[in-house]
Amino acid sequence: MKPRQLIFELFGDYLRHRGGEVRLRALVAVLACFGIPDTTVRVVVARMRKEGWLAARREGRETVYSLTDAGWELLDERRDRIYGRATSPWDGRWRLIAFSVPETDRLLRDHLRKKLVRHGFGPLSPGLWLSPHERTEPVRSAFSDQPAVRLDVFHSDAGGRAADRSIAARAWDLAALDRDYEALLAAHARALDALRAGDTVGQAALTGRVSLIHDFRPIVFADPDLPLELLPAGWRGAAARALFLESLDLSREPAHAFADDLIAHA
């Protein structure tokens, strides 16, 4: 795990419930559990501060770090994507976004595509993306101040479930996603058994918890959260999510207690 991602994971899962800030020496102590050396932590923290993700204040001779508004906004968006799943029945309609960005603004186009993926959209063609859920407004809002980006939003149906399933198969690589979920289940099944038995405490609880979040996040970001009627047979996403949620529930107390103790002694 990269130090930057670890810092974001710690703020999102732990520090947001502990006042939202941390002393540098405490952050160094926590990241040492993941094999990250002191010097690397200091370099990464300085870089994240320069990029506008972290804010710092002095408390005596110590530096205390917190996320900026942009940092919390990013974490809140990630949190919604990880935990917020569609619960109501699908109305059978697709939400489509057609976009155009000048060739000279490739970075802006890449940013737009990443935003679309993050909100569960998939490409039907290079400039036409779609989702079965009403998630167009966050994309619109994110680029409302970008005159170079033109977005047109449509609602449509495909004329039947066979066509819907064909669209889903073309817009997303569901077979690859299913393999990723299978790999996650295989990698973390024993850890869940140990949590159920009460055998995971201390540093193992903290590192195992953060590792699971780190492994689950990129998979669920790529998952469009399709309705059941559009998923292939034997889909393992539901089992992986169940493992993820149960593991988080069982590891929360021992992981956070260890982090509390580590930070107190730091």
Image (tube, rainbow, N blue to C red):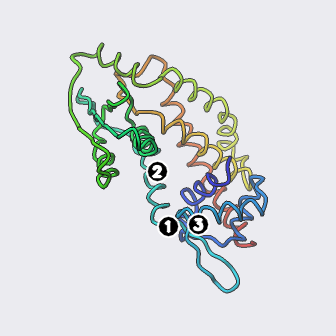
In this rendering, position of residue 239 left or right of residue 103: right
Q: Reply above or below: 218 against 265.
A: above
Counting from the top left corner in percent of width and height, residue 33 is at 76, 56
Q: Mark 1 = which residue?
A: 68
Crowding at dot 2, Cα within 10 Å, few <14 / some 14-19 / many 20+, comes out as some
What SS does tag 3 mark?
Answer: helix
What SS does tag 1 mark?
Answer: loop
In this rendering, position of residue 156 left or right of residue 74: left
Report the amino acid beneath label 1.
Thr
Along the viewing direction, whichever of 213 and 224 lies nearer the viewer? 224
Report the amino acid beneath label 2.
Arg
Counting from the top left corner in percent of width and height, residue 216 is at 56, 40
What SS does tag 2 mark?
Answer: helix
- Name the residue at 63% across, 60% down: 256
Report the amino acid beneath label 3.
Arg
**First-in-chain label (2 vs 3):** 3
- Name the residue at 21% across, 24% down: 157
Along the viewing direction, whichever of 114 and 80 lies nearer the viewer? 114
- Name the residue at 35% across, 16% down: 166
Quarter containing the C terminus: bottom right
Mark in the foreground, 3 or 1: 3
Crowding at dot 3, Cα within 10 Å, few <14 / some 14-19 / many 20+, comes out as some
Question: Marks 2 and 3, how far apart in space?
Answer: 22 Å
Q: Quadrant of residue 224?
A: top left
The disc at residue 79 is 2
Q: Mark 3 = which residue?
A: 49
The disc at residue 217 is none
